[in-house]
Image (tube, helix red, strand yellow):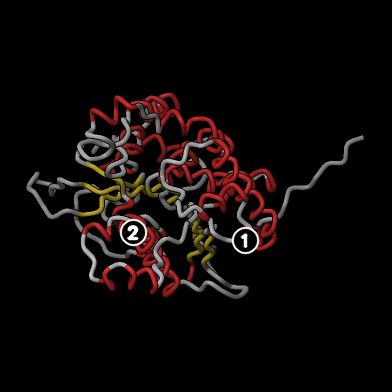
Amino acid sequence: MASPFRILSIDGGGTRGVIPATLLDCIYQATGKHPVELFDLFAGTSTGGIICMGLAYGLEPSVLVDLYLNKSEVVFHDTGFDDLRDGFGKNLGADYSNKRLKAILEDIFEEATLETVHQRLEAHGPEKSLMVCSFDLNPTDNEGEPINFRPAIYHSNFICDKDIKLVDLALYTSAGPTYFPIYKDHIDGGVSINHPAMAAVAFAINKNKEDVGGQYCYVDGTNKGLNKDLKDLKVMSLGTGTSNRNRIEAAQIKRQRNGDWGNLQWIEYLPDLLTESNVQASEYYVQQVLKAAGDDRQYHRVQLEFDAEEAPEAIREEIQKGKVLGLDVKNKKLLLAMHEYARQYYEQHEEEILSFLNIEKKAVTASR
């Protein structure tokens, strides 16, 4: 039997990325295994894409946790002047500048490119790779001719992507509409692939070959996918938490014009509804093709619910007020609550997680 091909998939979710970063740090601290030792393909969207880039680049998970806990307020910095300039909030401009985020990314990645990542991952194994999802508003074909809008998926194995700087790629994938400005014709990959597990599965099992002059793959110059068998895949998918705002009670629907809704009624629900539905649709697809239960399960999903009884009090208080934990949470109390929620989840499910990854806790040396 072939060794499993292990995929790590991380959703988008802004500063809620502290949740998957914390889970990965817990695994690292418990086992001594860096994620590059545990996974073959890193697939991420938006904040998940940045986490995957950092891991593939060689950062320890604790460094990423620290960024969320201590740099979120810097990234999502706003002033009254900014609001006035943008037309009272998001009406005429994005809520936040991307300059502070870009400066932080430049401090981390400097001039590194996807070729840099390819070389670093190759040192850990010939099949290890990174894929990051964005969305190109102005895509063209190889001859520069316009084509229809499409998701843009960048990959460390694609020769045509090798010169893309990690800083640019991070800004491609995280340019959330209304949150950050469009970056070089790209916006957040979450508009189409916020839960990238199925995109990663599709790439892994792609057996199609196309004569593209060595454009796509370092291995043989023609293989666009990884040519894996579905039965050999093993996927760990990490969400960034949910406020469960894609459910609208029947009484609420009837109370507002009996469901005959226009812009004013939908505006309260549509952003969260679209985001949550995007994630749940991908979850449905991947569970149809991968076994998610039993000793030989191929798929493990972690998604913390902010309205659950076990959620920290600080989070539940927000939800009970009718609020959601958005992409731009920067309140230190809430960030620490999400960090603690993820840590507690790991402690409660450690055996299940390590069993799925087929690894053991590192031995503890007794002190003299």
Q: Amino acid at mark 1?
A: Glu
**Mark on residue 269?**
2
Front in this rendered view, residue 159 or 19: 19
Left/right placement of residue 219 relative to residue 353 reads left
Label 1 sits on a secondary structure element that is loop
Position of residue 336 in the picture relative to residue 102 (left or right): right
Q: Nearer the viewer, residue 261 or 313?
A: 261
Secondary structure beneath disc 2?
A: loop
Whole-percent x and y of residue 206? 33, 64
For the residues marked 2 and 1, what is the alpha-carbon distance in whole angstroms?
Answer: 23 Å
**Mark 1 Cα shell of 10 Å, populated few (<14), some (14-19), many (≥20):** few
Q: Amino acid at mark 2?
A: Tyr
The image quadrant that residue 354 belongs to is bottom right
Where is residue 355? Give x, y as percent: 66, 62
Q: Residue at x 26, y 55 (%)?
A: 222
Residue drawn at (38%, 49%) of the image: 45
Residue placed at 60% from the left, 55% from the top?
311
Q: Is residue 316 left or right of residue 179?
A: right
Q: Residues within 10 Å of mark 2 (few under 14, many from 20)?
A: few
| Residue at the spot of label 1 | 309
Q: Between 84 and 134, which is closer to the camera in this rendering? A: 84
User: Quadrant of the rendered structure where residue 284 is?
Assistant: bottom left
Q: Is residue 229 visible?
A: no
Question: As displayed, is residue 244 above or below residue 46?
Answer: below
